[in-house]
Image (cartoon, rainbow, N blue to C red):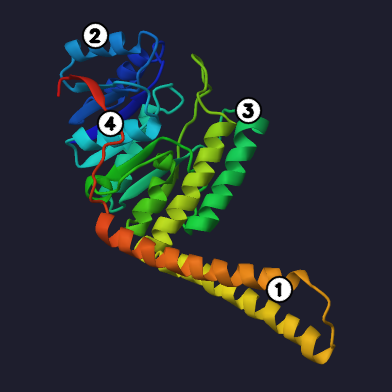
């Protein structure tokens, strides 16, 4: 079975056409379509209820409040029954005709297939240039080179993503997280349509969140089971700066015979104290990781309504 997961937030004008296109392009596939309504304030949920009544393949989750796209995708993953998960936007900019292309590549042996909007139909200054720079940065930091991390249209093999926990805006970093657990990743060109209805929900605030999540992902990929390497490394660096300051102070005092006050004494003390604190923080982080490693299992969303589930 193929599970198509579609986060929805205020997309009332797109939903019926999107459903028709999915059915037209995947009529021979065994599919389920999971719409996750992120507490829309328009008629999106009413339209989804009507679609679900007419087609049992449609499943609808409705959140109690707006939890964001990452939470919506995580909720879709949690209830999906298929062996292949397809994630796509509800705004008709992704083309359902590309889904077969992604599924074929998964069937050929890839674990994650990411869409690449090579001919992207978005504003150059406000969307495409910042996206280009962000993709370069993410590729360098995660060592998973993709042209378009921001493309929502992606395919995942179920067993790769079922145990990955998503927070913040980490859905766009899923290929990097999947690579961390050994996934084989491929990127393929997909069609990108001009947005005809509604308006974009993305802004500069979202970019800042993604950058913060990128730092988190880098930490998780490199140091999640050994946080003392980070804190301890910074602590040792601080100790080294403290010793350099001490050496300069002693050189001034014993060789140059300069007894005048110098801020290096203050810096030396600060560096030594900071070094001790950072090393101790590393030890505490190690203890917390071992005690609390995925133990709370706290949900990142709360469901108000389920339909056909």
Locate residue 65 relative to residue 158 in the image: left or right: right
Viewer-side residue, 264 vs 131: 264
Q: Name the residue under label 3.
A: 123
Mark 3 to mark 2: distance in Å? 34 Å
**Residue at horizontal 76%, vertical 69%?**
263
User: Tag 4 or tag 1, which sits nearer the N-term?
Assistant: 4
- Asked if the residues shown at circle 4 and circle 2 are in contact, with their CB atoms under 8 angstroms apart, the answer is no
- Mark 3 or mark 2: which comes first in sequence? 2
Task: Give the mark, 2 or 1, whose residue is nearer the N terminus.
Answer: 2
Camera-side residue: 306 or 22? 306
Question: Of the numbered discs in the image, which one, if any, rests on residue 50?
Answer: 2
Label 1: how many Cα within 10 Å (few below 14, some 14–19, many 20+) = some
Q: At x 24% / y 33%, what residue is drawn? A: 3
Q: Name the residue under label 1.
A: 265
Q: Position of residue 292 (x, y in %)?
A: 27, 54
- Determine crowd level at label 2: few under 14, some 14-19, many 20+ residues with C-alpha closer than 10 A: few
For residue 4, which numbered disc appears in the image? 4
Of callouts 4 and 2, the N-terminal one: 4
């Amino acid at each position: 079975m193929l599970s198509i997961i579609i986060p929805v937030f205020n997309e009332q004008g797109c939903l019926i056409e999107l459903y028709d296109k999915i059915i037209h392009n995947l009529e021979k596939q065994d599919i389920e379509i999971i719409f996750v309504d992120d507490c829309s304030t328009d008629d999106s949920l009413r339209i989804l209820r009507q679609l679900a009544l007419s087609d049992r393949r449609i499943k609808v989750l409705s959140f109690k409040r707006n939890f964001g796209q990452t939470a919506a995708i995580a909720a879709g993953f949690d209830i999906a029954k298929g062996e292949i998960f397809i994630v796509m936007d509800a705004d008709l900019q992704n083309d359902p005709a590309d889904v077969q292309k992604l599924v074929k590549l998964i069937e050929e042996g890839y674990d994650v297939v990411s869409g690449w909007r090579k001919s992207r139909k978005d504003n150059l200054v406000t969307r495409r240039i910042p996206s280009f720079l962000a993709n370069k940065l993410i590729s360098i930091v995660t060592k998973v080179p993709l042209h378009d991390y921001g493309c929502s249209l992606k395919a995942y093999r179920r067993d790769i993503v079922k145990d990955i926990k998503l927070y913040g805006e980490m859905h766009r970093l899923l290929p990097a997280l999947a690579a961390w657990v050994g996934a084989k990743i491929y990127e393929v060109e997909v069609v990108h349509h001009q947005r005809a209805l509604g308006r974009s929900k993305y802004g500069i605030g979202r970019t800042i969140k993604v950058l913060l999540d990128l730092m988190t992902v880098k930490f998780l990929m490199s140091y999640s089971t050994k946080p003392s390497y980070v804190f301890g490394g910074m602590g040792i660096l601080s100790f080294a700066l403290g010793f350099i300051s001490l050496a300069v102070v002693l050189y001034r005092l014993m060789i140059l015979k300069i007894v005048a006050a110098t801020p290096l004494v203050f810096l030396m003390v600060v560096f030594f104290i900071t070094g001790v604190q950072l090393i101790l923080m590393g030890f505490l982080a190690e203890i917390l990781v071992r005690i609390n490693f995925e133990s709370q299992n706290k949900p990142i969303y709360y469901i108000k309504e389920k339909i056909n589930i």
